[in-house]
Image: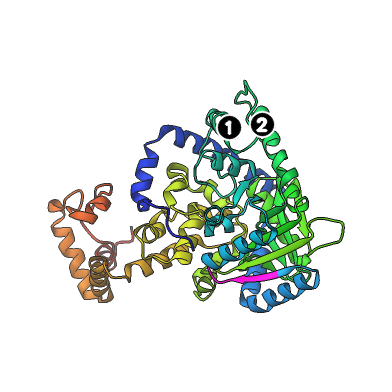
C-alpha cells in the first residue's frame, strides 16, 4: 500500500488537533447525523434486512475462500469479451501498468471516476510524475482536488467542507484547471453543482482516456459495476476511447444473482436510497458502443496477506458503504484526516494496518482509534465484526518490540488471575489499602497520556467472593 502521507502524526496527535477545530466538528456532526438517520429509515423499510445482511456476509466469505478460482474465471470472461487483464502485486506495479497504458494512447490527461483503489496506490501522483494530468469528476473528489486537500470520508470525501468553503475553492481555483466558476456564484447547492457541471462537461467531451474503479466484478461474465449518484461515472465509462479500471481483488462476486444482494445492501447503507440513481455495468468492449479498448488491472497490494489472517480476513467483505463512519463517535469528532489513510473511520482502523502493516507509528495507533462501542458492527451491511478485528490487531501491535511494559503488565495480571489463592490475596490487600489509593495512576511518559483522562475505579470494602462466602456460611439469603 502507498506510504503514510508525509509528516502525518499518529492518530492521537492528529485527533487532538482535529477536535480543537469547531468548524470541522460542526460540519462532521451535521453530515454524519443526517446520513445515519436517513440510512436507518431506509433500512427499516425492509423486513428481511437481517437476512440480506447474512446473505451478503455468506457470499463474501464463500468468495474469499475460493478467490483464486473466481479471479481466474473473471479473467477468462473479461478476455473473452475483448478486454485485457493485468495483475498488479503492489502499488508500484499498478501505477506502472496504468502509466504505460496511458502513454501508449499518446494522451497526456485522463478523467477519473471516483476510485478508492487509485487513491490507495497514489495513482494521481504517479501519473503527474509521468507528465499525465488526472481530472477527478466526482463532485466531492473535485472539491478535494481543487482545494489541494485529502479525502476524509469514503462516501463524501469533502464532508469536512461546508458550502461557503466550497464556493471559495471553486471561485479561486476552477480557472486554473479548466472552465472557471461563474461570476457572482453563491454557496447555494444548485449554483455550486452547475459550476461543477460546466467545468466537468468540457473535460468529458475532450478526454480520450478514462480511469475507473469498480464496486463489483461479476466472475461469471467478467462484468464490472459502478454505482453512483451524479452521472459523472456514466460519462467517464462511455465517452472515452480507452477505459482502464483498477479493481481490488476482493471486489469479485461469483454471479449476477449474488450481485442482486449487494445492489440492495449498498445503496441503503451508503446514500440511504432504495437504488442508486446510476448503476453502470460494462463487459469488455462492444463495437460502436462505449470505449474501443478496455483494460482491467487487478490489484493485490496487501490483500492476500489480509486473506491469510483468519480473524482479519472478514475485513475484505467491506463494500465501502461508509455506514460505520457515520455512527462512529470517534470519527464524528476527529474526522477522516486523522487516520492518515484513504480509508478513514472504523473500517480504516482495521483495513489500513493490515494493508500497510503496523511498523509505522500512525499504523500502529489505528487499532486504538476506537472506543469498541460496537456501533460499527451493528450497521455493517456485511456483518464485519470490526471490534473483534480491532482487538486482534491490538494484540499484534503489542507483540512488537517496544511494548515490553504492556506485555509485562498483562503477563503479571495473567499470573495473578490464574491462581484463586493469589487473586483472593490481591483482592484482600486492595480492600485493606483502599483509603491510600490515588484517584489516577501516576504513570510517567506514554502512560501519562492514558492515565490523565481515566480515574481508577473505587475498590469496594468487600469483594463479591468474600460477600458470597459470608452469606453462605451465615445462612443469609438477602
State the residue lying farthest toward the front: 106
Up the image or down, 161 lies above or below 448; here it is above
Q: Nearer the viewer, residue 346 or 134?
A: 134
State the residue lying farthest toward the top: 184
Mark 2, residue position: 195
Q: CA distance from mark 1 to mark 2?
A: 8 Å
Q: Residue at x 49, y 63 (%)?
A: 1
* Left or right side of 111 for 461: left
Up the image or down, 337 lies above or below 354; here it is above
Say whether residue 115 is magenta.
Answer: no
Residue 446 position, x and y percent, is 24, 55
Question: Helix, strand, or loop for circle 2?
Answer: helix
Labels 1 and 2: the sequence-earlier one: 1
Mark 1, residue position: 170
Question: Helix, strand, or loop for circle 1?
Answer: helix
State the residue lying farthest toward the right: 288
Say whether residue 87 is magenta.
Answer: yes
Q: Nearer the viewer, residue 279 or 40?
A: 279
| Magenta highlight: main SS | strand
Q: Nearer the viewer, residue 41 or 345?
A: 345
Residue 467 position, x and y percent, is 26, 62
Residue 384 position, x and y percent, is 55, 62
Numbered range of the magenta stretch: 85-90
Q: Quadrant of the C terminus?
A: bottom left
Picture disc at residue 367: none
Q: Residues within 10 Å of mark 2 (few under 14, many from 20)?
A: many
* Residue 401: quadrant of the picture: bottom left
Q: Are marks 1 and 2 in contact (CB under 8 Å)?
A: yes
Q: Residue at x 29, y 65 (%)?
A: 468
Amino acid at each position: 500500500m502507498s506510504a503514510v502521507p508525509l509528516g502525518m502524526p499518529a492518530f492521537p496527535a492528529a485527533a487532538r488537533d482535529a477536535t480543537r477545530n469547531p468548524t470541522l466538528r460542526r460540519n462532521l456532526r451535521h453530515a454524519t447525523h443526517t446520513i445515519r438517520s436517513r440510512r436507518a429509515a431506509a433500512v427499516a423499510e425492509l423486513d428481511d434486512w437481517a437476512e440480506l445482511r447474512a446473505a451478503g456476509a455468506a457470499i463474501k466469505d464463500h468468495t474469499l475462500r475460493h478467490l483464486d478460482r473466481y479471479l481466474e474465471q473473471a479473467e477468462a470472461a473479461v478476455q473473452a469479451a475483448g478486454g485485457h487483464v493485468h495483475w498488479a502485486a503492489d502499488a508500484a506495479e499498478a501505477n506502472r501498468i496504468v502509466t504505460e497504458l496511458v502513454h501508449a494512447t499518446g494522451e497526456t490527461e485522463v478523467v477519473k471516476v471516483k476510485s478508492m483503489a487509485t487513491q490507495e496506490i497514489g495513482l494521481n501522483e504517479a501519473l503527474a510524475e509521468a507528465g499525465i494530468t488526472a481530472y477527478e469528476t466526482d463532485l466531492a473528489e473535485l472539491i478535494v482536488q481543487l482545494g489541494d486537500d485529502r479525502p476524509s470520508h469514503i462516501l463524501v470525501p469533502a464532508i469536512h467542507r461546508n458550502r461557503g468553503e466550497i464556493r471559495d475553492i471553486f471561485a479561486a481555483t476552477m480557472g486554473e484547471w479548466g472552465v472557471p466558476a461563474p461570476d457572482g456564484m453563491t454557496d447555494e447547492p444548485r449554483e455550486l453543482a452547475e459550476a461543477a457541471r460546466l467545468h466537468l462537461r468540457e473535460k468529458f467531451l475532450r478526454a480520450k482516456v478514462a480511469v475507473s474503479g469498480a464496486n463489483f466484478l461479476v466472475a461469471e461474465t467478467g462484468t464490472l459495476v459502478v454505482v453512483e449518484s451524479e452521472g459523472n461515472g456514466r460519462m467517464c465509462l462511455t465517452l472515452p476511447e480507452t477505459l482502464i479500471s483498477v479493481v481490488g481483488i476482493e471486489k469479485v462476486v461469483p454471479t449476477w444473482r449474488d450481485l442482486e444482494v449487494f445492489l440492495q445492501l449498498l445503496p441503503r447503507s451508503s446514500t440511504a436510497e432504495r437504488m442508486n440513481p446510476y448503476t453502470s455495468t460494462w463487459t469488455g468492449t462492444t463495437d460502436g458502443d462505449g470505449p474501443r479498448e478496455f483494460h482491467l488491472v487487478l490489484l493485490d497490494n496487501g490483500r492476500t496477506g489480509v486473506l491469510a489472517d483468519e480473524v482479519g480476513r472478514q475485513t475484505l467483505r467491506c463494500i465501502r458503504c461508509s455506514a460505520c463512519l457515520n455512527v462512529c463517535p470517534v470519527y464524528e469528532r476527529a474526522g477522516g484526516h486523522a487516520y492518515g489513510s484513504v480509508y478513514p473511520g472504523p473500517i480504516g482502523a482495521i483495513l489500513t494496518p493490515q494493508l500497510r502493516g503496523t511498523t509505522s507509528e500512525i499504523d500502529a495507533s489505528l487499532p486504538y482509534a476506537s472506543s469498541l462501542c460496537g456501533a460499527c458492527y451493528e450497521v455493517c451491511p456485511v456483518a464485519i465484526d470490526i471490534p473483534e478485528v480491532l482487538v486482534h490487531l491490538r494484540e499484534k501491535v503489542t507483540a512488537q518490540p517496544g511494548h515490553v511494559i504492556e506485555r509485562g503488565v498483562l503477563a503479571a495480571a495473567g499470573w495473578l488471575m490464574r491462581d484463586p489463592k493469589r487473586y483472593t490475596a490481591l483482592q484482600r490487600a486492595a480492600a485493606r489499602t483502599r483509603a491510600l489509593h490515588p484517584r489516577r495512576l501516576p504513570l510517567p511518559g506514554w502512560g501519562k497520556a492514558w492515565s490523565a483522562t481515566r480515574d481508577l475505579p473505587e475498590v469496594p470494602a468487600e469483594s463479591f467472593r468474600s460477600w458470597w462466602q459470608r452469606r453462605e456460611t451465615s445462612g443469609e439469603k438477602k
